[in-house]
Image (tube, grey):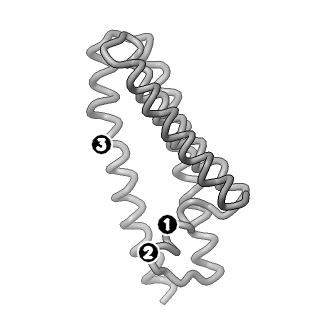
Amino acid sequence: MRKPLAAILRVAAGIAVVWVIYWMRGNRYSRLYPVLMSGIAFSLFAVSLFRTPLVERFARRMGERLDEAGVRYCRKVTVAWTLFLAIHLAVTVWTLFLPLRVWAFYNGCLAYLLMGAMFIGEWLIRRRVRKRLS
């Protein structure tokens, strides 16, 4: 995708998100916010698998010089995040039909703990992989 078109799409997506947040304010539909955010995150990771994986982009922006093994690792991590986010999205949609306290517990607490565990787990695995490859 050309850069000007990508920039326009990012701005349009940002405006859409702000509009949806404003529209949902004080409304029972505000429970859809986690579904929207999870759907966007899942889409970004999933679409990136058909181009340069998102984790590889993050690594390169942080100054990493990736060899072929590093590129393969980044793809695997992107696949792992895509699967995690697909499951998370499904659970987030499911909680819409559950009592508010269950929805709030998952979307306000448990989801963040699971994402944190995923980050920490990947960081620990990455350290071992780096040590093994060097």
Q: Amino acid at mark 1?
A: Phe
Q: Residues within 10 Å of mark 1 (few under 14, many from 20)?
A: few
Q: Earlier in the sequence, mark 3 or mark 1?
A: 1
Q: Quadrant of residue 7?
A: bottom right
Decide: marks 2, 1 in contact (CB < 8 A)?
yes
Element assignment for label 1: helix
Give me the C-alpha separation between circle 2 and circle 3: 25 Å
Element assignment for label 3: helix
Q: Position of residue 107 (x, y in %)?
A: 34, 29
Element assignment for label 2: loop
Q: Quadrant of residue 52?
A: bottom right
Residue at which label 2 appears? 62
Q: Position of residue 8 (x, y in %)?
A: 61, 49
Q: Nearer the viewer, residue 26 or 108?
A: 26
Q: Amino acid at mark 3?
A: Leu
Give me the C-alpha separation between circle 3 and circle 1: 22 Å
Q: Amino acid at mark 2?
A: Met
Numbered mark located on residue 113 in the image? 3
Q: Earlier in the sequence, mark 2 or mark 3?
A: 2
Question: From the viewer's perspective, is the residue at label 2 or at label 3 nearer?
Answer: 2
* Residue at 34% from the left image edge and 58% from the top image edge: 120
Q: Residues within 10 Å of mark 3 (few under 14, many from 20)?
A: few
* Residue at 62% from the left image edge and 63% from the top image edge: 75
Q: Quadrant of residue 32?
A: top left
In the depicted structure, whether residue 94 falls above or below residue 106:
above
Numbered mark located on residue 58 in the image? 1
